[in-house]
Amino acid sequence: MLENRVSERTAELERANELLKKEITERKNAEERILEENTKAQNYLDVAGVLIIVLDENQNCTLINKKGLEILECTSEDIIGKNLIDYFILESERKDVHDRCYTLLNDGCEINCESHIVTPTGKKKLIKWINASTKDQNGNIHGIIVLGQDITEQRRIENELKENEQKYRLLADNTLDSIWKMDKNLVFTYANPATNLITDLETEDFIGTRLQDHFHESEMKKMMEIMSYSIKHGSDAKFTKIETFIYDKKRNLIPIEIYAKMLFDENGDFCGLQRTTRKRIHFSDSQK
């Protein structure tokens, strides 16, 4: 009887042991699958061309991709578990960013914005952010996913272009020479105030009108013959001088000389025309 009980107990222990071994194996396989999925997900994130960060409800970083580390100029140890705003956002902008995060964590929305970061090396960068709340399987907000793009250089170029455009406009608006700009259809897109000195027409009388609206048909034909070679063969970075006549406000013909430059896009296609114009001294046949 005792032997039977011992035998049964031994069998029970063996079955329990087998079940335990099976459970351990299944748990190990599950952990390996989770690790594999996490590795795969991280690989996907790392090939993304933008910064990707996941923040928890305390705004601490729980995940960051390779591009994020590159933009922040730090290692994962510098950011994981730390508050992104307190460690990287420019101090003067932190309150606004904290307020936006509070809105995200409470309203479950998406916020697009820009703010500056300061890297551990002290470099200041302008980042364009896309922020969205994250939810668990029950629909409860538990964090924020952040996408960021470094637009520092882009904004610098935009500001330089704007500054150069303002300088150009200031010079153009104050020169005594008439300056025109036209698109590829020879429609005026710009005329400076000096145009009025030649034609008695205001700049708004030119914008949107066509080149042929201001020249006699015979003069248009002459100009097109002069310009056709450059338009056909591309820009040689030279100005073409053209002597012609333009209509003034009363449709009188005014003698002018034009220095025209054909404009071409990056593909070499004609895209417009820039001209500097001034009155020229015109002698009648009796004066020659």
Image (spheres, rainbow, N blue to C red):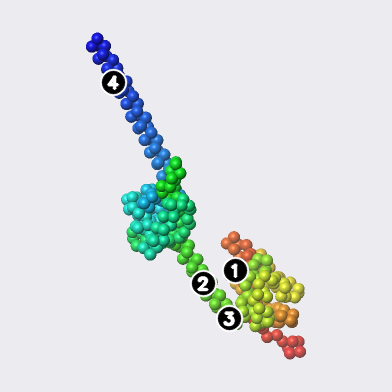
Which residue corresponds to the image point at 62% horizontal and 80% vertical from the top-left? 194
Q: Which residue is mark 1?
A: 236
Report helix, strand or loop for mark 3.
Answer: loop
As measured in the structure, the alpha-carbon distance from the residue carrying label 4 to the one carrying label 2 is 85 Å
Which residue corresponds to the image point at 72% horizontal and 73% vertical from the top-left? 213
Q: Is residue 278 above or below residue 57?
A: below
From the viewer's perspective, is the residue at label 1 or at label 4 nearer?
4
As measured in the structure, the alpha-carbon distance from the residue carrying label 2 to the one carrying label 1 is 24 Å
The amino acid on which the numbered mark 3 sits, given as a three-letter code, is: Thr
Crowding at label 3, few (<14), some or many (≥20) Cα neighbours within 10 Å? few
Q: Earlier in the sequence, mark 2 or mark 3?
A: 2
Q: Earlier in the sequence, mark 3 or mark 4?
A: 4
Q: Is residue 112 left or right of residue 199?
A: left
Q: Is residue 65 shown to the viewer in this render?
A: no
Q: Which residue is mark 2?
A: 164
Report helix, strand or loop for mark 1.
Answer: loop
Crowding at label 1, few (<14), some or many (≥20) Cα neighbours within 10 Å? few
The amino acid on which the numbered mark 2 sits, given as a three-letter code, is: Asn
The location of residue 8, given as percent across then percent down, is: 28, 15
